[in-house]
Image: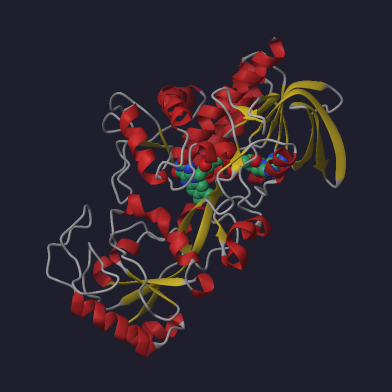
Amino acid sequence: MADFSKTFDVLVVGGGNAALCAAITARRGGASVLVLEYAPQAFRGGNSRHTRNLRYMHKQGNDFLTGPYLEDEFWDDLLRVTGGKTNEQLARFMIRKSEDMLDWAIAHGVRFQPPLSGTLSLARTNAFFLGGGKALVNAYYQVARTLGVEIAYDSEVCDLAIRDGRFSSAVVEQNGASRKVRAKTVVVASGGFEANIAWLKEGWGELAENFLIRGTPYNKGRMLRVLLDHGTKRVSEPDQCHAVAIDARAPRFDSGIVTRVDCVCFSIVVNREAKRFYDEGEDIWPKRYAIWGRLVAQQPGQIAYALIDSKSQGLFMPTVFPPIEANTIRELAVKLELDPDALDDTVTVFNRAVRPGVFDSTGLDGCATEGLDPPKTHWARPLDTPPFYGYPLRPGITFTYLGVAVNERAQVIMQDDQPARNIYAAGEIMAGNILGQGYIAGIGMTIGSVFGRIAGEEAARNVSN
Ligand SMILES: Cc1cc2nc3c(=O)[nH]c(=O)nc-3n(C[C@H](O)[C@H](O)[C@H](O)COP(=O)(O)OP(=O)(O)OC[C@H]3O[C@@H](n4cnc5c(N)ncnc54)[C@H](O)[C@@H]3O)c2cc1C
């Protein structure tokens, strides 16, 4: 049980990767540290516990990665997906700082697995955690505890006392009671606001009612609201987020990675009117998976259906929900509650438009449609080999980008462009500095790990000065 009567050197708000990196680093820097995690212990670790890998700069391959990934390539990848909506100086700084991340994680109990092959093609750029993000989070909690970091669960921080850019105390709710916690510095690592449907509606309108949230229900953005209300400078927009297509049968929150539907590039995707609406084979899946949440969100009722035939079974990561199966397209339409005539027509027109080519599931191949709008530019094969399969899709929100501005010291920036005196931010809450839009796999953990460690270091230094 944490002793709330004392004044801590560093208060860390949140209990995911960014928070734990900050807490461990601050403690190693000699500070007394309290972590306040909104979730109960069994659900600690925020979205970080759902992760599988991290992207980091490295000069050569190793036991976990097949080759080098240098600053300029990392930067080019980021620039492409963000369309320039990123802070180059801060992003390049983060990329360089990521270089020792793997060693740091290993030194703090995280284990990695040998390079993976498969549809995400990340074997050179991203290191995969053995046991996933949950194992990483558990390792960090273990280290934090051993170092003497105090941790309280079921503890929602509801307010921060901030005056002229200086923090002095926090209000925390525990089991319905409000308590005051004093600290000399604060690191806010409480995630985005993706689990707050009302806030998502500010960016998306009523469409957000049909969104599913892939991660923790505890990231409601309360700290983000408090910081913005206290005059911190904001980055990105309320509708910017990472969103993928997930199985529509997934629960509202916390379904994690197993509901992501990865067959899209081998499928045709139709809306509830049984019409196709986008080129399913535009590019390789790692470069396109993050656009499908948004695409499905723009369809009537925010629902769509990915359809494959038996030829495509086994080419992609299976989902936890088995597909809906039928021996004819008309029968599949009935099972998916689509108009059988309309779906039959869409499939017939698609099949006729497919041109002969050599199918290759591992790279951009020559299988395309001709004279079809929208086209399918790769992996186009007729749906003609039963059984046929359908996956219902909904937008699955991973995390939001609207956040607080920070500098290279992870200091929160106020509206007058001056850094706050003792307030630091790390992880999703400041991800919008790097990600104004778009996403590259594994960068969520880069952002949290790099800025978490910097925030912890800076907060400890601030106290000792
Ligand atoms: C299904 C899924 C898979 C993903 N896979 C990957 C991947 O493989 N690689 C990758 O890089 N990224 C991945 N991401 C994104 C990644 O999870 C995030 O970018 C990263 O974990 C963010 O870390 P964080 O510490 O900022 O936030 P989180 O890990 O979400 O932690 C936020 C914490 O703050 C707590 N909190 C919230 N509000 C309060 C409050 N008011 N008071 C106290 N505590 C509060 C929450 O309970 C939580 O513990 C994935 C996300 C999801 C949902």
Q: Is residue 320 visible?
A: no
Residue with the most extreme front position:
416
Residue nearest the observer in this picture, 33 or 421 = 421
Is 201 placed left or right of 250 in the picture?
right
Residue with the most extreme top position:
465
Quarter in which the C terminus is drawn? top right
Judge whether 52 appears above or below 292 on screen. above
Judge whether 114 appears above or below 291 on screen. above
Is 199 placed left or right of 57 in the picture?
right
Q: Is residue 170 visible?
A: yes
Q: Position of residue 456 (x, y in %)?
A: 62, 23
Which of the 4 quarters of the picture holds residue 413?
top right
Q: Residue at x 43, y 46 (%)?
A: 439
Q: Position of residue 428 (x, y in %)?
A: 57, 40
Q: Position of residue 224 (x, y in %)?
A: 68, 42
Q: Residue at x 39, y 80 (%)?
A: 274
Q: Residue at x 45, y 42 (%)?
A: 85
Q: Position of residue 402 (x, y in %)?
A: 58, 45
Residue with the most extreme bottom position:
341
Residue nearest the observer in this picture, 454 or 50 = 454
Residue nearest the observer in this picture, 447 or 214 = 447
Quarter in which the N terminus is drawn? top right
Q: Write down which quadrant ligand 1 falls in.
A: top right
Q: Residue at x 56, y 26 (%)?
A: 407
